[in-house]
Image (cartoon, rainbow, N blue to C red):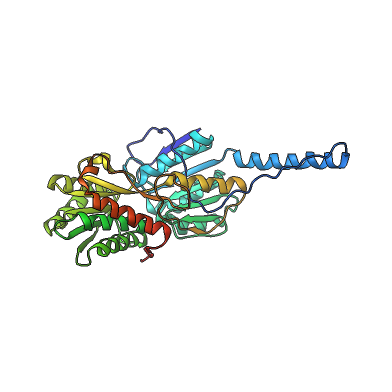
Amino acid sequence: MVVYQTSSTNSISPLTVLTFLSVTFLAVNGISTFQAQMPQPPSLHLSTATAQSDQNVIDSRTRALRIALLTDALFSDAGWGAFGFNAAQALNSKYGHTVDFKDNVPIPDIETTLRDYANKGYDLIIAQGFEWGNPAVKVGKDYPNTKFVVFTGLASSTNVASIFPMQQEGAYLLGALAAMMSKTEVIGFVGGERYPNLLNIFEGYKQGARDINPNIQVLETYLDDWDNSTKGKEAALSQINDGADLLFHVADTSGHGVIQAAKEKGIYAFGAISDQNKLAPNTVFTSFVLDVEKAFDHAVKMVQTGNFSGQIFKPGLEAGKGASGDGIIYLAPFHSLEDKMPEDVKVKLEELKQGIINGTIIVPERY
């Protein structure tokens, strides 16, 4: 059962559910079996009890949960809001969980919204957005039986966990690619707001670019607005006028303006969070993508198995969507633009990716 609510004026019908992003924080132990030694009544009795215990574990791992996905973003943004919406729907279609959705929550209403859903008895509340962290901790104290997961966040308590992906690792690859592709030695970054996660992403982008070309100029603009494509376009045009010939945005729907400016000026842009190539197939070269399905999936399993851990999880790069290992960040396909990338650039990019995954290249957190 999927329940959908929206505070935005444009409602969205639920789509087919995609898979809940897993944050590979905990492994599930295998179920032990017991062979009865017949005919020994005590052993037979123990076998029955053990089988019942094992069945209870199986039931807990498969029982349907009541889950809510709450966000201040828009599910229609083709980016941050949309990818969470799609991933959360998989919890219903794949596992049969009851999922309730609510988007466009005003920042001042975050605590009230969390309290409202906790009061309704949800097993798991996924709060999508950095600003939800502290309110989740505050509300969580009053609802100890409800589990909260903040994506992406840096807050935690007994029943509140945060997922803070090492997005700077994906941004590093985009910075390196931009530096290898740039003809002007000037590239740009447009962010929605200057806060820790965005600063971290920008620093990774800059490191990747300068590891390729120490002399490259990396322009940086923050809009203080996540839902204003006009502002995004103006910022992008300003950077293009200053010589930038590759742009990277992390700005939700404001970033659509960045992509539009790049399209009009005939340069490439990089998307973020989800594969944004469809917004401008001949302009969006690639995007760094969060494998939210993988992260959400493991969050749900923590609740089902009773192994919920209130901590901050920091998964990094993965080889590709759904790859084994802890990572939940990957680069989207290049689609029709792949033949625009020289072979030596492809080889170098793959080399850098493997370097990050195996730990020979370190992209530290910086705020």
Which of 12 and 94 lies nearest the eye of the viewer?
94
Residue at image point 20% right, 52% down: 231
Where residue 199 appears, as percent x and y from the top left, is 32, 62
Mark yes or no: residue 113 visible: no
- Tell me: 291 left or right of 219: right
Q: Residue at x 36, y 35 (%)?
A: 12
Task: Find residue 227 and report its horizontal and vertical position in percent.
Answer: 28, 48
Going 30% across and 48% down the picture, which residue do you hit? 287
Q: Is residue 253 above or below residue 97?
A: below
Q: Position of residue 320 (x, y in %)?
A: 39, 46
Foreground pick, 177 / 98: 177
Q: Is residue 290 left or right of residue 67?
A: left
Q: Residue at x 67, y 43 (%)?
A: 57
Q: Quadrant of the C terminus?
A: bottom left
Q: Nearer the viewer, residue 321 or 194?
A: 321
Q: Is residue 288 visible to us here?
A: yes
Residue 241: % across, % down: 11, 56
Left/right of residue 161 with respect to residue 262 in the rendered view: right
